[in-house]
Image (cartoon, helix red, strand yellow):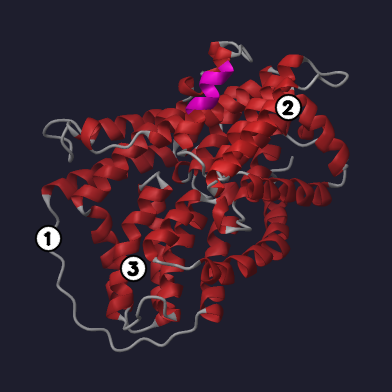
Amino acid sequence: MKTSTLLAAIVVAVAAAIFFMPPPAGLSATTMHAAGLVVLAIGLWAFHLLPEHITGLIFLALAVLFAVAPPAVVFSGFASATMWLVFGGLFIAEAVRSTGLGERLARLMLDRYTSSYLAALIGVSVVATLLAFLMPATIGRVLLVIPIVCALAARMGFEPASPGYNGLLLCAIMTTYHSGTGILPANAPNLVLAGAAETLYGLEIIYAEYFLVQFPVMALLKLGVSVAILMWVFPAQPKPAPTTTPLSPMTADERRLSLILIVAILFWATDFIHHIKAGWIALVAGLLCMMPRIGVIPMSAFNDRIRYGPFFYVASILGLGSVMTEAGLTKAIGDMLIVALDVEQGADAVNFGKLVAMSTLTGVITTNPAQPALLAPLAAHFAEATGWPLKAVLMTMAVGYSTMLLPHMVPPVVVGFQVAGIRFRDAMRYVVPTAAVSLLVLVPLDYLWWRIIGFLG
């Protein structure tokens, strides 16, 4: 029997056992049914036994068929503005890729740094951060940057699997993710968190507020940590960089797309003024990319080029959180975790560490985008126990999932390793020390930052 088949059988068996288990005192049969379906979905996601969006759709279908929650609750994710941020982001990502604007931006930033390994690492980090503002999909940014950085490594004389090659490619892949954790539309977990806050609590997490709270420490400082660790773990000395072919002038499509992106970014960054949700801005920008004469990709791209898996994946993740709340599973788990974590009002620093640790460790047993979906329904219970604003508790979850303990926790990163040819043991040489510095140094600094800006109330 194949390992994947055996794992699938175990996941289904455990989920079925929970589904049909007599409910303990204080819980209903519906709560146990919801728990069984959640275990099934998380198990399939954790072991990558099916494509993520297929697993999500299976969860939605079973939740409706077994009447675990009303259809309006099961499919509530589709009504969230976050879903349309994902939808518009798919078109923006395709436009940036197909017009060559992403490659142009990367080459403009990287070609001048081929004579210095440190400068090249910094340049790759800067490009990854800039693209995080332009392209909402992490996997799209990873796949765009990898061939460019591979070419950069070749121009610097680094052979595949050499320390210099591993350092540059790990920098491209990991800083693409790290920078995105501090920019609301840039990573799927951010979107799931924002969508869960909206669907579960009616709270709107706005672009500017999220950026202020998360970007300075857990994105910007972590980029510096990443470069330092890569220089230490993968030291290298480049050979003289050969000359490269000059960039051609910008095409009309690139100029139009640049204008669309600049306007979209301005609207995202000023949402605290106009209160237009990021999802509607992304939807309009994505549609403009396809409009005749205005757009930069053909309307046929709607059917031929766009992959809609992420759209249904995020919708199912949001639905999972709503089903957990509706069925009473959230309250049951929250009560257990509150007892286990022993959080109490007044111990803010300790509570911060405990909540971040809980969020980080959750990623070991599930995929990265599922972390906020699993934990967001518990936020109200922890807010009551700690005395914090509800939004502050939700934001600690973002601090938690920004730290990766094992490579499998972040699917776009795993894809990047496979495409770039990064071996697991080489990736772990970066992941372990980075996680240690994040938890021991950056998390306490982040707590201090939140105190300085008055975010904990």
Residue at which label 1 appears:
249
Residue placed at 64% from the left, 38% from the top? 10
> In front: 30, or 208?
30
- Among the 4 quarters of the image, the one containing residue 21: top right
Q: What's the residue type where badge 1 is placed?
A: Pro
Q: What's the residue type where badge 2 is placed?
A: Ile
Residue placed at 65% from the left, 35% from the top? 374
Mark toward the start of the polypeptide (1 vs 2): 2
- Among the 4 quarters of the image, the one containing residue 337: top right
210 with respect to 136 (left or right): right
Distance from the alpha carbon under mark 3 to that under mark 1: 21 Å
Binning the other alpha carbons within 10 Å of mark 3 as few (below 14), some (14 to 19) or many (20 upward) gives many
Secondary structure type for disc 3: helix
Mark toward the start of the polypeptide (3 vs 1): 3
Q: What's the residue type where badge 3 is placed?
A: Val
Binning the other alpha carbons within 10 Å of mark 2 as few (below 14), some (14 to 19) or many (20 upward) gives many
Please say if the residues under marks 3 and 1 sit with CB atoms less than 8 Å apart.
no
> In front: 241, or 418?
418
Above-or-below relation of 71 to 406:
above
Q: Which mark is residue 149?
A: 3
Above-or-below relation of 229 to 218:
below
Q: Position of residue 149 (x, y in %)?
A: 33, 68
Residue at which label 2 appears:
18
Distance from the alpha carbon under mark 2 to that under mark 3: 47 Å
Q: Is residue 246 magenta?
A: no
* Magenta portion: prevailing SS class: helix
Q: For the magenta stretch, what is the residue range?
A: 57-63
Residue placed at 55% from the left, 75% from the top? 228
